[in-house]
Image (cartoon, grey):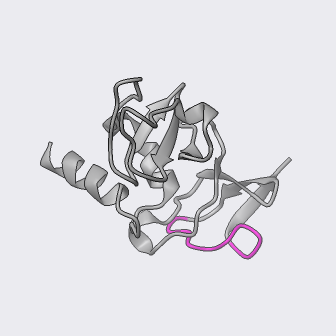
Amino acid sequence: MVAAINFVSEAQKEKTMIDNITIIEHAELFPAWSQYWTGKCGSIVADDGKLYKALEDIDEKNNTKPSSNADLWQYIGNPSEEYQEWAKPIGVLDAYTKDDKVTHNGKKYLSKIYGNIYEPDVHGWKIIK
């Protein structure tokens, strides 16, 4: 429980060290948005199966559905998508593993190696047609 709270707290920081794919992998830790939800800038919520990050403090006056307001909410990703958008790993702890699937520059890739920290166009990935 404490680890989950720490993860959510770190994920919601402005300059977090946690990438969007790691956040998406733990989507169940974030609350579902509701018309009564309020939170600080950086808070993450689920809406219609997708994750969004608040771009400013949200209160009862400006609380709008994340999927319909890109001015207040930044789309993070959809946990149900098989191919998530590639994000540069910070290091070994969040590196991609063998058989991870990503999209990058409009193409789909499959990681061929464990501990893959490389950009898909550079090394360690196979293009999926």
The residue positioned farthest toward the right in the image shown: 129
Q: How far across and down, in percent of the image, does residue 85 sit?
A: 65, 53
Q: Nearer the viewer, residue 97 or 72?
A: 72
The residue positioned farthest toward the front in the image shown: 61
Q: Is residue 98 magenta?
A: no
In the picture, measured across the screen, residue 102 lies left or right of residue 93, that is right
Q: Look at the image and give the residue range highlighted in magenta.
A: 114-123
In the picture, measured across the screen, residue 80 lies left or right of residue 108, that is left
Which residue lies at the image location 40% right of the left edge and 54% below the top edge? 42
Q: Is residue 42 above or below residue 28?
A: below
Q: Is residue 54 above or below residue 120?
A: above
Q: How far across and down, in percent of the image, does residue 5 sit?
A: 20, 48
Which residue lies at the image location 57% right of the left edge and 43% below the top edge? 77
Q: Nearer the viewer, residue 21 or 116?
A: 21
Which residue lies at the image location 41% right of the left edge and 29% below the top edge? 33
Q: Nearer the viewer, residue 86 or 48?
A: 48
The mark tally for this picture is: 0
- Quarter occupied by residue 107: bottom right
* Figure quadrant of the N terminus: top left
Q: Is residue 119 magenta?
A: yes
The residue positioned farthest toward the left in the image shown: 2
Q: Nearer the viewer, residue 71 or 27?
A: 71
Magenta part, dominant SS = loop
